[in-house]
Image (cartoon, helix red, strand yellow):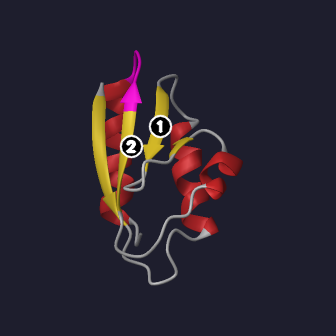
Amino acid sequence: MKKVELTINNPQGLISRKAAELVGAANRFKSNTILKTPSGDEADLKSIMNVFDTLINFGETLIIEIDGVDEDDAASAFEKLIANGMF
């Protein structure tokens, strides 16, 4: 299992465009991907509706847990997306 941290720096929280980027990245891999919030909420990162159901606010640090056959590649992809994106 791999874990990747993501801190939300947008004052509006996790906006839909950025949520869609995360979901798109998750769906490129076979591994299970779970998004965990500081409040204890969890969402299947392969489902945009699950991500929208979580309330993700400015300043929160999220954990993306990746578990599966291609978890290393998926973790690298998320790290690159986070490094290049304005979350």
Magenta region, mostly helix, strand or loop? loop
Q: Earlier in the sequence, mark 2 or mark 1?
A: 1
The residue that mark 1 highlights is 34
Percent of width and height locating residue 79 = 30, 49
Tell me the kind of residue under disc 2: Ile
Tell me whether circle 2 and circle 1 mark residues in contact (CB < 8 Å). Answer: yes
Percent of width and height locating residue 28 = 55, 34
Q: Residues within 10 Å of mark 1 (few under 14, many from 20)?
A: many
- Residue 44: quadrant of the picture: top right
Segment tinted magenta in the rendering: 66-70
The residue that mark 2 highlights is 64
Tell me the kind of residue under disc 1: Ile
Does the stretch in magenta take in 28?
Answer: no
Please report the residue visible at 38 percent of the width from the left and 43 percent of the height from the top.
Answer: 64
Residue 52 is labelled as none
Please report the residue visible at 66 percent of the width from the left and 42 percent of the height from the top.
Answer: 47
Is the residue 10 above or below the residue 39 in the image? below
Is the residue 7 above or below the residue 77 in the image? below
Query: Which residue, as the protein is rendered here, is positioned at the far top?
Result: 69
Image position of 64 (left or right of 12):
left
Q: CA distance from mark 2 to mark 1?
A: 6 Å
